[in-house]
RNA sequence: CGGGGUGUAGCUCAGUUUGGUAGAGCACUGCCUUCGGGAGGCAGGGGCCGCAGGUUCAAAUCCUGCCACCCCGACCA
């Protein structure tokens, strides 16, 4: 491809509203353009990368035995009513009406459609297992789209759905998909990590996310390097403290703490560490009353853990300040578990292990100190409620956790029978008995992979594409192209490289060298070859890898082999 | 949905306080010079100053309403 036939539309200046580096570089390199909030056009350069990722995904899914289909992006409401998600799914679901007033939606995911397809097409256990996938545009009406294609409303996703007669077969397929995903992300050249994950709204039991490690990632993950344990922090269990609770040493006292509300303020005022303060959070219970959640002052509530507790209403809802004032007569900052009549207490394991602690006195401007479980108030019910922290023991008992950030590029689920049961997807088994099938589902955010790759591979000059997903393999730059000898040499080399199957971007523009170099580096082409008068003189060309510091002189006769050795 | 902010050339932004002929840099077009790290000169093209009302002799600028976008939070997962 010649640059004179492939407008680059690179910019030197960084667009003002792009926050993260991948978004900035995708705009500056001319890969994408925003049409509207969360909606992006892929320009030719960006599309090339997107399609490379798509191709790797497709090849590995096919290799793993999955079958490609293509389902409609627009789906009828009936199917969603059948699965029960028409009412459950929030405003993220873009609902639409056609001219006949029939309701439908633009698909954010395709469990319903695929389950419907399955029940119409597959009759016998002998046709199982089967795994259908598609690569297709999804729409989720994100409340706050941001970071370019990283969290867009419309995006390209590979989604796969497998069907099985029993759980064992599902687990085997799940494992195969797990391996296929590892191959896919390895091939894209990304540093990634599979982590245990929550199943969320999709439902199901077992689930893993594939995280590309990046500081800009929106998810936090807990990792234990020695043992290999890795999980999304929202899921990672915090183990109860090993040491037994110290015996009470102080007596209960009420002290005035005027104006002190937050844990930090109270701890500072009382001269105690935050870990000696008890944090009391009031949330709505599943029966309509309030429930008090108790945490050590320096710990954070894990909302997902909380809302999975049977006594707590899901989604987690904090008590309103007004209601607390009315029912308890004090503000949030003065809440404590002592004497909270009629409100169940649930203490985090670490909170239950505290002794001689401080907490609110349920009276504005006062706190209690020297509080002890079992003496000043009953032993509480305990649960794992807190967010894990760096340095916590790993849940598998080996080593300690570190926290890292990641970008979720893939998510696989063992769904079970949630959809097949609701929608009557079954087959006849060996005995001629009708059996509800069990399902798995497997997603990859294809467009997000592109952004994640940039987050992980860039420098101050621009993108440094991993070779397998680079828009072009080689940049060929002619310097002093108006010199007939240079033009001729560059044309000849371009023809030769193209003929040997190398994907070349030939910068044949009448531009200064600095402009060409800067553009080729910004758009991140992995290999660069320069043809110049000075090199022609001694029968060589100049080679430089995108991450190399210095160029290398390579004999003209050897450059094609030289490149091929580096392309693989 | 709540709070904050911004809308002026394709992009990055001045100009708004104090009303008086719409600007700069980059990008774009032409010519000349230059040519191994985003060149220089000259000459150009490009604007419903987000939209709609209002005040005024006169509005990018003041007033009212609306819209869009961005950030933080909540929501969603």
Image (tube, coloured by chain):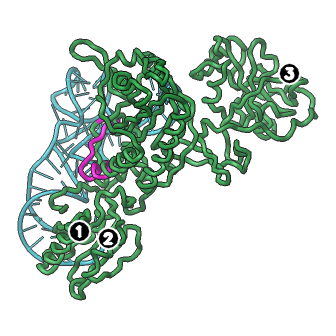
Chain colours: A green, B cyan
Q: In this view, does A78 lie above or below A490?
A: above
- Residue A383: image location, x then y, percent: 73, 28
Q: State whether residue A474 appears in this view.
A: yes
Asked if marks 1 and 2 fall on the same chain, the answer is: yes
- For disc 1, the chain is A
State the extent of the magenta-drawn residues as a range.
A36-50
- Decide whether residue A46 is among the magenta residues: yes
- Decide whether residue A80 is among the magenta residues: no
Which mark, residue A500? 1
x 87%, y 37%: residue: A244
x 19%, y 56%: residue: A7
- Residue A374: image location, x then y, percent: 88, 24
> Disc 3 designates what residue?
A377
x 33%, y 38%: residue: A68
Q: What element carries label 3?
A: loop
x 64%, y 47%: residue: A229
Q: How far apart are marks 1 and 2 (CA)?
A: 9 Å
In front: mark 3 or mark 1?
1
Q: Distance between the residues labelled 3 and 2?
A: 75 Å
Which mark, residue A300? none
Lower position in the chain sequence, tag 3 or tag 1: 3
Q: Is mark 2 on a helix, strand or loop?
A: helix
- Label 1 Cα neighbours within 10 Å, binned few <14 / some 14-19 / many ≥20: few
Image quadrant in which you'd find residue A42: top left
Q: In which quarter of the image is the C terminus of chain A?
A: bottom left
The answer to the question of whether label 3 and label 2 lie on touching residues, with beta carbons closer than 8 A, is no
The answer to the question of whether label 3 and label 1 lie on touching residues, with beta carbons closer than 8 A, is no
Which mark, residue A564? 2
The answer to the question of whether label 1 and label 2 lie on touching residues, with beta carbons closer than 8 A, is yes
């Amino acid at each position: 491809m010649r640059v004179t036939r492939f407008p680059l539309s690179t910019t030197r200046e960084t667009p003002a509203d792009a926050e993260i580096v991948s978004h900035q570089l995708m705009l500056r390199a001319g890969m994408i353009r925003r049409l509207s909030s969360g909606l992006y056009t892929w320009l030719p350069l960006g599309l090339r990368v997107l399609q490379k990722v798509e191709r790797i995904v497709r090849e590995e899914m096919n290799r793993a035995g999955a079958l490609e289909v293509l389902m409609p992006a627009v789906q009828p409401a009936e199917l969603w009513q059948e699965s029960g998600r028409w009412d459950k799914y929030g405003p993220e679901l873009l609902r639409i009406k056609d001219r006949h007033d029939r309701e439908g939606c633009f698909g954010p995911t395709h469990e319903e459609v695929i389950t419907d397809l399955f029940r119409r097409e597959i009759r016998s256990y002998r046709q199982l297992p089967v795994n259908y996938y598609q690569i297709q545009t999804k729409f989720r009406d994100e409340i706050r789209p941001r970071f370019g294609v990283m969290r867009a409303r419309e995006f390209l996703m590979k989604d796969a759905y497998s069907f099985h007669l029993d759980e064992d077969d599902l687990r085997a397929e799940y494992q195969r998909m797990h391996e296929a995903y590892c191959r896919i992300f390895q091939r894209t050249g990304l540093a990634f990590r599979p982590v245990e994950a929550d199943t969320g709204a999709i439902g199901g039991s077992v689930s893993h996310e594939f995280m590309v490690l990046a500081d800009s990632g929106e998810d936090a993950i807990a990792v234990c390097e020695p043992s290999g344990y890795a999980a999304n922090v929202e899921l990672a269990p915090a183990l109860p403290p090993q040491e037994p609770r110290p015996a009470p040493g102080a007596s209960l006292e009420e002290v005035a703490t005027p104006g002190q509300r937050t844990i930090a303020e109270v701890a500072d005022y009382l001269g105690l560490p935050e870990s000696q303060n008890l944090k009391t959070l009031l949330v709505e219970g599943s029966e309509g009353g309030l429930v008090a959640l108790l945490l050590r002052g320096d710990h954070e509530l894990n909302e997902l853990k909380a809302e999975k507790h049977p006594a707590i209403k899901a989604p987690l809802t904090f008590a309103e300040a007004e209601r607390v004032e009315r029912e308890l007569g004090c503000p949030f900052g003065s809440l404590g578990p002592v004497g909270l009549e009629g409100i169940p207490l649930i203490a985090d394991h670490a909170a239950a292990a505290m002794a001689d602690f401080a907490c609110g006195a349920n009276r504005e401007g006062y706190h209690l100190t020297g509080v002890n479980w079992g003496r000043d108030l009953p032993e509480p019910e305990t649960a794992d409620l807190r967010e894990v922290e760096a340095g916590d023991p790993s849940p598998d008992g080996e080593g300690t956790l570190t926290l890292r950030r990641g970008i979720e590029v893939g998510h696989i689920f063992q769904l079970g029978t949630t959809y097949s049961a609701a929608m009557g997807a079954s087959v006849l088994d060996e005995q001629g008995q009708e059996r509800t099938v069990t399902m798995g589902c497997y997603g990859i955010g294809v467009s997000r992979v592109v952004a994640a790759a940039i987050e992980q591979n860039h420098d101050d000059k621009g993108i440094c594409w991993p070779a397998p997903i680079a828009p072009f393999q080689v940049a060929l730059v002619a310097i002093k192209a108006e010199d007939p000898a240079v033009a001729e040499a560059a044309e000849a080399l371009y023809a030769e490289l193209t003929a040997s199957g190398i994907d070349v971007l030939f910068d044949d523009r009448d531009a200064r060298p600095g402009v060409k170099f800067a553009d080729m580096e910004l758009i991140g082409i992995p290999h660069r070859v320069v043809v110049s008068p000075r090199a022609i003189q001694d029968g060589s060309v100049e080679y430089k890898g995108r991450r190399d510091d210095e160029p290398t002189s390579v004999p003209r006769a050897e450059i094609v082999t030289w490149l091929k050795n580096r392309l693989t």
